[in-house]
Image: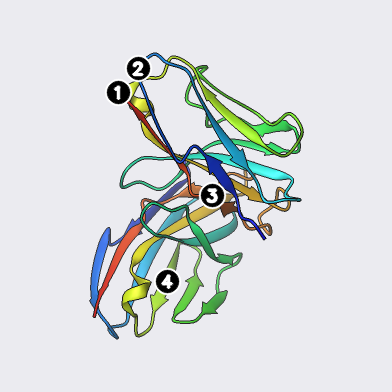
């Protein structure tokens, strides 16, 4: 069964304190892995798509990496405005175009 | 340009009632998706449209749930005989096409509460 597990469930950082969020996945085959950001009361906002092991993508203070079993979202010198829930999702090879999401990591960055 | 819009933003209904939730995708997007998100969980896939047809409805939990997209643009998710367990945020997303390379853009969601 295709599955996505994110850890930790919640993370508190001090402003400027870098850290990483983990997304472990089990799929029969991977078309793509997605990272989204979700603010309270809003829909998920697209961040990155990764397609193959070894791929990396960056956007401002965020960098996403992918291996054959997991993805990491690295946050460098975070600011309070980075506080949000970060969702990881996979697009399995044997499905239509639905995404399978993890439960997310709630990030709080304190000033 | 305008993003995905969903109406209403909030809906409170009594158990057993019928509800309709509407989604207006980004103009020109041929693919449309419905997801359901419970508190503290990630979105859960319900149904995917390519154009007017439902290409994958494997996520619909039972036959009380139905969705249409008659003209290939606006979509309506319909829930009959609502139950308290249907309470959740219903999210709509759209993309240029139905492939991994096409990013799914989400709307703000409709929060459904069944009392």
The residue that appears at 54% across and 60% down in the rendered structure is A33
- For the residues beneath circles 4 and 2, the answer to whether they share a chain is no
The residue beneath circle 2 is B15
Q: Earlier in the sequence, mark 2 or mark 3?
A: 2
**Mark in front: 3 vs 4:** 3
The residue beneath circle 1 is B115
> Mark 3 falls on what kind of element?
loop
Q: How is the image coloured?
A: rainbow
The residue that appears at 48% across and 73% down in the rendered structure is A64
Q: How far apart are marks 2 and 1 (CA)?
A: 6 Å
Q: Where is residue A44 in the image (x, y as percent from the top left)?
A: 48, 55
- For the residues beneath circles 2 and 3, the answer to whether they share a chain is yes
Q: Distance between the residues labelled 4 and 2?
A: 41 Å
Q: Which of marks 2 and 1 is nearer the N terminus?
A: 2
The residue that appears at 72% across and 50% down in the rendered structure is B27
Compare residues A34 and A106 and report the one nearer the observer: A106
Q: Mark 2 lies on which chain?
A: B
Q: In this view, does B21 lie to the left or right of B88?
A: right
Q: Quadrant of the N terminus of chain B?
A: bottom right
Q: Earlier in the sequence, mark 3 or mark 1?
A: 3
Q: Where is residue B39 in the image (x, y as percent from the top left)?
A: 32, 43
Q: Distance between the residues labelled 4 and 1?
A: 39 Å
The residue beneath circle 4 is A73
Task: Kindly indicate whether the residue at mark 1 contacts the one at mark 3 (C-beta within 8 angstroms).
Answer: no
Q: Mark 3 lies on which chain?
A: B
Q: Mark 1 lies on which chain?
A: B
Compare residues A62 and B3 and report the one nearer the observer: B3
The residue beneath circle 3 is B107
On screen, residue B64 above or below A19? above
């Amino acid at each position: 069964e295709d599955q996505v597990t994110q850890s930790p469930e919640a993370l508190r950082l001090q402003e400027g304190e870098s850290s990483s969020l983990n997304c472990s996945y089990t799929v029969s085959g991977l078309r793509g892995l997605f990272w989204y950001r979700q603010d309270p009361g809003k829909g998920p906002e697209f961040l990155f798509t990764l397609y193959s092991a070894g791929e990396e993508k960056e956007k401002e203070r965020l960098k996403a990496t992918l291996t054959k079993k997991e993805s990491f979202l690295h946050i460098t010198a975070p600011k309070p405005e980075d506080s949000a829930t970060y969702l990881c999702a996979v697009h399995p090879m044997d499905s239509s175009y639905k995404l399978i999401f993890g439960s997310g990591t709630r990030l709080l960055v304190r000033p | 340009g305008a993003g995905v819009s969903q109406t209403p933003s909030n809906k409170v209904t009594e158990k057993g009632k019928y509800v309709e939730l509407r989604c207006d995708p980004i103009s020109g997007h041929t693919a449309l998706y419905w997801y359901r998100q419970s508190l503290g969980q990630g979105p859960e896939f319900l149904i995917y449209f390519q154009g007017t047809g439902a290409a994958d409805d494997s996520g619909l939990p039972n036959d009380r749930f139905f969705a249409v997209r008659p003209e290939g643009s606006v979509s309506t998710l319909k829930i009959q005989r609502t139950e308290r367990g249907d309470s959740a945020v219903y999210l709509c997303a759209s993309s240029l096409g139905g492939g991994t390379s096409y990013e799914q853009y989400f709307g703000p969601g409709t929060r459904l509460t069944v009392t």
